[in-house]
Image: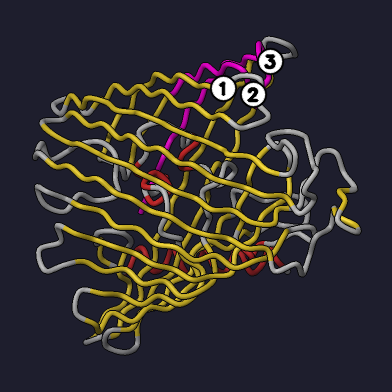
Amino acid sequence: MRTHTLAQCISVILAGTLAGSAAAGGITVYKKDEKYVKLGGRIQLQYHQADPDSGSTTDEVFFRRLRPYIEGSLHKDWKGKFQFDLGKAVDDNEVAIKDAYFQYKGFDNMKLTLGNANFPFSREFLTSSKYQQLVERSFVGDHDYGTPDRNVGVHLTGHNADKTLTWGASFASAAIDPDAGKLDFDTPVNRNSDFNEGWIYGGRVDFHPFGYTKFSQGDFKGETKATIGVAAFVWNNDDDNNSYTTAGSSTSTSKADIDRVTGFEISAAFRSQGFSVDAEYNRFSVDTVDAAFTGGMFRNGSTDLENWSIEGGYLFMPIGVELVAGYQSQDADNYADAWTRSSIGANWFLHKHDVKLQISYRMGENLKGVKGSDEDELFIQGQYVF
């Protein structure tokens, strides 16, 4: 039944593609007055090889992301969108819900979004995977290491008249996958039975002195742009689902129920004449439900998790090739040494971000804070966006 339904969806999308007209961000297959339907998608086919110092080399080819979406409107100032990912099919979890919201745009310089949408934290996370310079996000944009994922709630975004100042604020339901080795935020719409549940609230402000700078890495236009942003949030466990704590004590050495998280971000970006650089620092103060838990990144029931990253590149516009490099670091209270990653790579743009090939080589040292535990990784990815 699932296969038949998927086949029908693909047939509809293909038919709409043939009948529709191309537009920025998807293909509009129907439009009349205020009514429209738009279809789009993202295909990222990736090869990944991991070569740890201790252990065997492994590799795989897989769909990193396979995300169709549908967007539409029946009424002025309203729209709805849902997007799902077939690339993360694991066991019975064959479809992961991504964007799923409806939005009101009738306010001056402000939008109200209700549903599962991006939480306004981490410039790198808010930059779509379509527009990343390195194949994989660094620590500062990874929901495995403190950055909130898409969450279900109320989201406001806005800007001043000339868009030199932009902002966002959210109040939402958010889940954490309890793991001593990481701080893994997950959307509650794709929850597992052991997820910690809670509420998150926070916001961000970005200043663009030379005009609005999009959440996108690289520089195709050659214009001088810059931005600096700050953001913060608080997450509190509602104590509905602490699977690894009994009578205040942890029942696992590898899983840690999280009680509270506060996060802070400062980030910046610069673009000019094909050159681009992005830098970000995140800090998370985390408490576990068991005030004595020690393991992974936690010591005596808490940790201060710090991530920072700098990455950049130069685009040779005539040939559509961009050389990129980056460095990132993560440290936590219970780490013996900081976990660092150095990356080099190249991107070949056949049709800007719509059709591109990427290669990144990442050298990791002191994985998960274990001194001397190193691993090199190779990523090769092809991307097609419509």
Residue 65 horizontal/vertical position (percent): 52, 47
Q: Which residue is mark 1?
A: 338
Residue 351 relative to residue 56: left or right: left
Q: Which residue is mark 3?
A: 57
How would you rate the neighbour count of disc 1 (Cα within 10 Å): few for under 14, some for 14-19, many for 20 or more? many
Front one among 131 and 290: 290
Residue 13, above or below 50? below
Assign the magenta stretch its main secondary structure: strand
Dots 1 and 3: beta carbons under 8 Å? no
Q: Earlier in the sequence, mark 1 or mark 3?
A: 3
How would you rate the neighbour count of disc 3 (Cα within 10 Å): few for under 14, some for 14-19, many for 20 or more? few
Residue shown at 27%/26% (left/top)?
313
Helix, strand or loop at disc 3? Answer: loop
Which image quadrant: the N terminus?
A: bottom right
Disc 3 marks a residue whose amino acid type is Thr
Q: Is residue 370 within the magenta segment?
A: yes
Residue 304 horizontal/vertical position (percent): 58, 39
Give the magenta part as a residue range.
360-386
Q: Is residue 231 within the magenta segment?
A: no
**Quarter location, residue 338:** top right
Disc 1 marks a residue whose amino acid type is Ala
